Image (spheres, grey):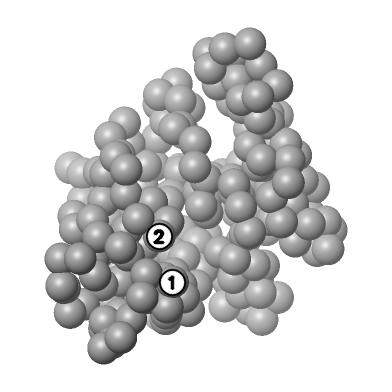
Amino acid sequence: MLKVVVLVSGGGTNLQALIDAGKCGTITNAQIIGVISNNKNAFALERAKQNNIPAYVVSPKDYDSREIFNDALLNKIDELQPDLIVLAGFLVVIPEQMIQRYRNQIINIHPSLIPSFCGTGFYGLKVHEAALERGVKVVGATVHFVDEGTDTGPIILQKAVEVQPGDTPKTLQKRVMEEAEWKILPKAVDLIANGKVSVKDGLVAIDTAQR
């Protein structure tokens, strides 16, 4: 059973997608053993409690320096001993020490088709604002492993979503969540939980054989 810890900062819709996928059997051989947020007011914490998942707050505001916070975050994760860490809208820079310790065990969901509209400054609505300003016709979401760069780790899954006439950043964000993020994040966790994902030379290979 793959032990999963989910890191969140806000509403936790992707966390909810993972919880729902586990309940309906879309994700197998995995269990969410903890949710950590940097924001004590994140609704994601309430989602965790409603589903009897241990929830923790580790906030930079509670520590005198970013270094001390990084140590506290890593200590909490080490305490939980996860097999997989899922960044589901976690708006905190992951400490390099954590990336090194959990190499190819941290995944992130990003609301664009990487390498488009990614990197420093591209998060949340800003991604969709930039996509609409550029006039692209297709957007989407990407699940990738986390490395020392920003949105630069090996790509696991991507799903495209068409831009519709009259889209606003908010309507586009909602459609990308519903049609892409909430589908490929649970799928990625299921693939990893069942030993279907491997990384070699910075590229992901997925075993498509039936289990």
Vertical placement of residue 29 versus 162, above or below: above
**Residue in the picture at 74% in, 52% down:** 45
Between 137 and 4, the one nearer to me in the picture? 137
Q: Three-letter amino acid code at disc 1?
A: Lys
Q: Which mark is residue 125?
A: 2
- The spot of residue 93 in percent (x, y) is 44, 32
Asked where in the image residue 55 lies, by quadrant, the reply is top right
Q: Can residue 128 be seen here?
A: yes
Vertical placement of residue 211 versus 67, above or below: below
Query: In the shown orientation, is residue 199 left or right of residue 143?
Result: left
Q: Can residue 75 be seen here?
A: no
- The spot of residue 138 in percent (x, y) is 21, 77
Q: Three-letter amino acid code at disc 2?
A: Leu
**Residue in the picture at 40% in, 35% down:** 103
Query: In the shown orientation, is residue 108 left or right of residue 59?
Result: left
Which is more N-terminal, label 1 or label 2? 2
Q: Which mark is residue 170?
A: 1
Between 107 and 68, the one nearer to me in the picture? 68
Query: Callout 2: helix, strand or loop?
Result: helix
